């Protein structure tokens, strides 16, 4: 068997509606056309919805190259960290289950690794298709504030479509607060501002980051996650994210992310 070049890690949490519309088949069909060896790890964050787990695990059982991984609940970054530890590829792609950024956008990111970059992130630009007005406003406020404090050179830290060398991912993720504090009261799916901390740590360790424009439109059909947003969780997390930016800045000033 050829050595695996690309490991695709897809975090999963209450994804029934997304899975039912065939998102994993889209990923499979795209990868099947590639010349390099690949693997896909569906990394479940202990979804409360048993149907979500069933659909994902059954797909993996029927499709070579796909693996289903269960994790102790800790939010999206913990699901990613579980996948990173299991990955065997040289490069890891993080992509969301809903495929708001289609897997084919990978074609835009891969060339950057040939140019010597260690981390390549997708950038949704300023136009966010299917964003609600409140999400657009919150996103604009957060981006403006964050760039004034951290990572001014990066437009979009929050897109779910990111690639890293596996060695870099395994070095950086243990530095994140959410990984260090795993098991201490995390609820729900999103853990605020972990992307910002990850990218700041990458920068502090002098790894090269490239930002590439990608296609993006909100396609998340998960009913459970939509209900969480309706309950006001999105507004609360937006406020928490602003607090987290200050925490990351403080840690950076203390040299916490340097080698």
Image: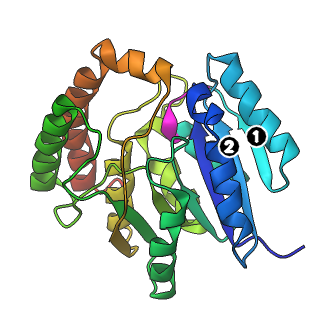
Magenta residues, as a range? Answer: 73-77
Which one is in front, 37 or 180? 37
Q: Of 46 and 53, which appears nearest the observer?
A: 53
Disc 1 is placed on an element classified as strand
The quarter of the picture where residue 244 lies is top left
Image quarter hosting the N terminus: bottom right
**61 or 143, nearer to the observer:** 61
SS at circle 2 = strand
Is there CB contact under 8 Å for labels 2 and 1? yes
Which residue position is annotated with label 2? Answer: 42
Q: Residue at x 70, y 20 (%)?
A: 51
Q: Residue furthest top?
A: 231
Q: Which mark is residue 22?
A: none
Q: Which mark is residue 68?
A: 1
Residue 112 lies, in percent from the top left, at: 45, 80
Q: x and y percent of residue 108 in the render?
A: 45, 74
| Relative vertical location of residue 162 with respect to residue 57 in this rendering, above or below | below
Q: Is residue 49 left or right of residue 248?
A: right
Real-space Cα separation, disc 2 to disc 1, in angstroms: 5 Å
Residue 10 place in picture, x, y as percent: 60, 46
Which residue is painted at 48% across and 20% down in the image?
Answer: 223
Residue occupying the point 44% across, 53% down: 101
Vertically, is 38 above or below 127?
A: below
Instruction: Tell me if mark 2 has few (under 14), some (14-19) or many (20+) residues whose alpha carbon lies within 10 angstroms of its own.
Output: many
Residue 194 can be seen, yes or no: yes
Quarter assignment of residue 231 = top left
Which residue occupies the extreme right position in the image? 1
Q: How would you rate the neighbour count of disc 1 (Cα within 10 Å): few for under 14, some for 14-19, many for 20 or more? A: some
Q: Is residue 87 visible?
A: no
Q: Main secondary structure of the magenta part?
A: loop
- With 228 as the anchor, is 16 left or right in this view? right
| Vertical comparison of 155 with 86: above or below | below
């Amino acid at each position: 068997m050829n050595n695996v070049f690309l490991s695709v890690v897809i975090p999963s949490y209450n994804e029934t509606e997304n899975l039912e519309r065939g998102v994993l088949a889209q990923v499979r069909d795209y990868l099947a056309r590639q010349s390099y060896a690949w693997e896909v790890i569906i990394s479940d964050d202990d979804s409360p919805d048993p149907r979500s787990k069933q659909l994902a695990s059954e797909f993996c059982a029927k499709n070579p190259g796909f693996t289903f991984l269960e994790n102790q609940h800790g939010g999206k970054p913990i699901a990613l960290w579980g996948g990173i530890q299991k990955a065997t590829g040289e490069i890891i792609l993080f992509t969301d289950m809903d495929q708001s950024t289609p897997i084919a956008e990978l074609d835009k990111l891969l060339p950057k690794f040939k140019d010597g970059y260690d981390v390549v992130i997708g950038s949704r630009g300023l136009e966010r298709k299917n964003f609600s007005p409140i999400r657009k406003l919150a996103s604009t406020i957060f981006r403006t504030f964050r760039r004034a404090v951290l990572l001014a050179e990066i437009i979009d830290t929050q897109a779910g479509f990111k690639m890293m060398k596996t060695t870099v991912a395994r070095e950086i993720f243990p530095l994140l607060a959410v990984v260090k504090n795993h098991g201490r009261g995390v609820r729900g799916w999103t853990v605020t501002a972990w992307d910002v901390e990850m990218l700041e740590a990458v920068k502090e360790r002098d790894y090269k980051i490239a930002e590439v424009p990608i296609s993006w439109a909100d396609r998340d059909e998960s009913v459970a996650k939509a209900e969480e947003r309706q309950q006001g969780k999105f507004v609360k997390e937006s406020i928490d994210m602003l607090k987290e930016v200050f925490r990351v800045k403080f840690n950076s000033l203390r040299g916490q992310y340097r080698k």
